[in-house]
Image (cartoon, grey):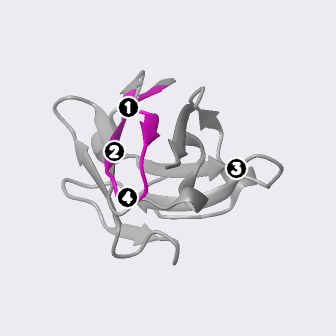
Amino acid sequence: VQLVESGGGSVQPGGSLRLSCAASGFPVEGALMTWFRQAPGKDREFVAAISGGMVGSTFYADSAKGRFTISKDNAKSTVYLQMNSLKPEDTAVYYCATRPGALIGTTIGSYEFWGQGTQVTVSS
């Protein structure tokens, strides 16, 4: 299993970024795929998840609702996180993660596979 994130960068408040997580070694269609983030000096936290299935159910942290959208392209084995209306408090390293099973879960310790992370900085 390999997860590779990309798409991070620096953006001004109110801007947008789309993160990508390219997965290999397992079928994305049937897998739970989740985004977490870790800000400097803070614990890693759940951001958004999409369950296994052709389309997948989605679930968001309160901080992400209405601004972030998680989606996946099964044919490309890629999961996306579209982030709009970014705020300085969204600054963090964003990680893609997965675990066996298709159901959504937000417990960090239950995730077995992680990417290396991509830095997102929101600053004026």
Look at the numbered discs 1 and 2 and tell me whether their residues touch, using CB distance below 8 Å: yes
Q: CA distance from mark 1 to mark 3?
A: 17 Å
Identify the residue at horizontal 29%, vertical 34% (top origin).
78
Which numbered mark, 2 or 4, is in the foreground of this view?
A: 2
Q: Which residue is mark 1?
A: 7
Which numbered mark, 4 or 3, is in the foreground of this view?
A: 3
**Mark earlier in primary sequence (2, 4):** 2
Q: Which residue range is magenta in the image? A: 4-22
**Mark earlier in primary sequence (1, 2):** 1
Q: CA distance from mark 1 to mark 2?
A: 7 Å
- In the image, residue 3 above or below residue 95: above
Mark 4 closeness class: few <14, some 14–19, many ≥20 residues within 10 Å: many
Identify the residue at horizontal 28%, vertical 31% (top origin).
77
Identify the residue at horizontal 35%, vertical 68% (top origin).
67
Look at the numbered discs 4 and 1 and tell me whether their residues touch, using CB distance below 8 Å: no
Kindly identify which numbered label has been placed on residue 50.
4
Look at the numbered discs 1 and 3 and tell me whether their residues touch, using CB distance below 8 Å: no
**Mark earlier in primary sequence (4, 1):** 1
Kindly identify which numbered label has been placed on residue 17.
2
Mark 2 closeness class: few <14, some 14–19, many ≥20 residues within 10 Å: some
Percent from the top left, x then y, of residue 84?
Answer: 32, 59
Q: Which residue is mark 3?
A: 39
> What's under tag 2, amino acid-wise?
Leu
Prevailing secondary structure of the magenta residues? strand
Q: Is residue 6 magenta?
A: yes
